[in-house]
Amino acid sequence: MASTSNMFGLKDSSLIKTQGYIDGKWVDSKDGARITVTNPANDKELGTVPEMGLTETKEAIDAASRAFKTWKNTTAKHRHDILLKLFRLMQENSDDLGRIITLENGKTLAEGKGESAYSASFFEWFAEEAVRTYGETIPSPFSNTRNVTIRQPVGVVAIMTPWNFPSAMITRKLGAALAAGCTAVIKPPPETPFSCLAITELARRAGVPDGVINIVTTQKNVIEVGKEMCESKTVKKVSFTGSTPVAKLLYGMSASTLKKVSIEAGGNAPFIVFGDADIEQAVQGAITSKFRGSGQTCICANRIYVQSTVYADFACRLAEKVSAFKVGDGLDEKTTHGPLIHERAVNKVAKHVDDAVSKGAQILVGGKRLDVPGSFFGPTVLSDVPSNALINDEETFGPLAALIKFQTEDEVIKLANASDVGLSGYFFSRDVGRVWRVAEALEVGMVGANTGMLSHASFPFGGVKESGIGREGGRHGIEEYMTVKLIVFGGI
Ligand code: SIN
């Protein structure tokens, strides 16, 4: 078999790392065990990374703790300069970074490069936030004291990320952590570890000191690694993006040390098209929101509610556009939509389609897995999805647009909010009063009003209800990695 770096065909093959990273050294697991990483477009092996466990996790946490002693005392300007250098290195290497994302995740090259730019932008954003971590002066309630607050880094941070954004979910957390003065132990997803390892190599080149970033790759040992990250007294914060059930487990484990947590968990986004919407704009919004990453984002539209007056028109236009998608290997320029991450993901979409159809839904487009190598499911539009279909309660995480008819605003708000989770929600209307009303009424952390796009480094990303805790990105993102300290000066 070709070497791992050859499998990626990069301009700079030294960006491909096949080891974990602890205390500034590329390292293997103690027992030599490896995880195999495959390309979801053809199931071919891309390479392997170490299967690390408890011992390596403890070493990584110790290294991060030692490095914290000096990193926390660097000036904000120093951290700003390093982060900006890292941002520029990511830009210079964007072709390679985009290609790594496409090969390990499956998304198209355009999406891979788009993610790489999005990912780099968090280092730029947080470089600029680092130098603005102001404290405050508090008017004194006593004549003989003066009172101020300062903001300090929380300490060692454990970061756990998913495969759907192999790069951006790392940098949205790591950028904020480094800017604040924290050090990090990262567990990248076993399906897509190479993006994280490439960013780590660029961070090393940008001058991030040894021990400040540590990478523990793991798959089978994920429970013991995750437990240690949550229960270690040395780790002061856990930041996790992934499913709600895993988030609950990690949150429970973190309670033992009362550490700070940020959680970005599952969504089940409502997407509402009112009768007064610009229908073409709504169709475009649905394509963007529903089919980005072949439906594998936490903010993908999941339940598409369309008012009865425009239902047929919307369904017809959406079906026409989805039928024109070109599904295939993300490296092929003609491909508009890549594979799903693995067979389990394909099975879940198939289950949602079969369930809805068995309860009366109609297939307008797709509805089947594709009989080719790789993990492909044909982009699908279902109409007349009934209220008892599974998709009403579960995130599909795949290329399935489920259309549900509604009659009134009150009815659709109730339907949209009838969910335990609340990450994002979307609606389309040209009535300004309704735009305000619905934006305020949706029980979600992020609303797209007449848009299907919510992602930017300057936006606070996060949910309500069982979709999570805290915000990432925006000016709020860095606060999650800092504490506020009060200092009262007496005897004045
Ligand atoms: C996610 O799927 O959680 C991330 C989406 C984004 O940042 O755009």
Image (cartoon, helix red, strand yellow):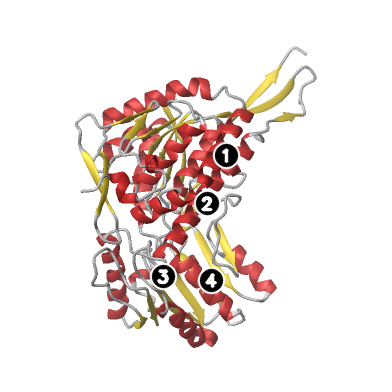
Q: On residue 244, which mark appears? A: none
At mark 4, the secondary structure is helix
Residue at the image point whose x is 75% and y is 19% from the top: 145
Question: Residue 36 placed where, x, y %?
Answer: 24, 47
Q: Which of marks 4 and 3 is nearer the N terminus?
A: 4
Specify the label residue 285 is tagged with: 4
**Residue 105, image x and y in percent?**
36, 55
Instruction: Using the numbered discs, state the Cα–Cα distance from disc 2 to disc 3 in whole angstroms.
Output: 21 Å
Give the CA distance from mark 1 to mark 4: 30 Å
Q: Are marks 3 and 1 in contact (CB under 8 Å)?
A: no
C-beta proximity under 8 Å, tags 4 and 2: no
**Label 3: which secondary element:** loop
Nearer mark to the viewer, of 1 and 4: 4
Q: How far separated are the C-alphas under marks 4 and 2?
A: 21 Å
Q: Which residue is identified by label 2?
A: 117
Q: Residue tagged by mark 3?
A: 334
Q: What amino acid does circle 2 point to?
A: Ala
Residue denoted by label 1: 478
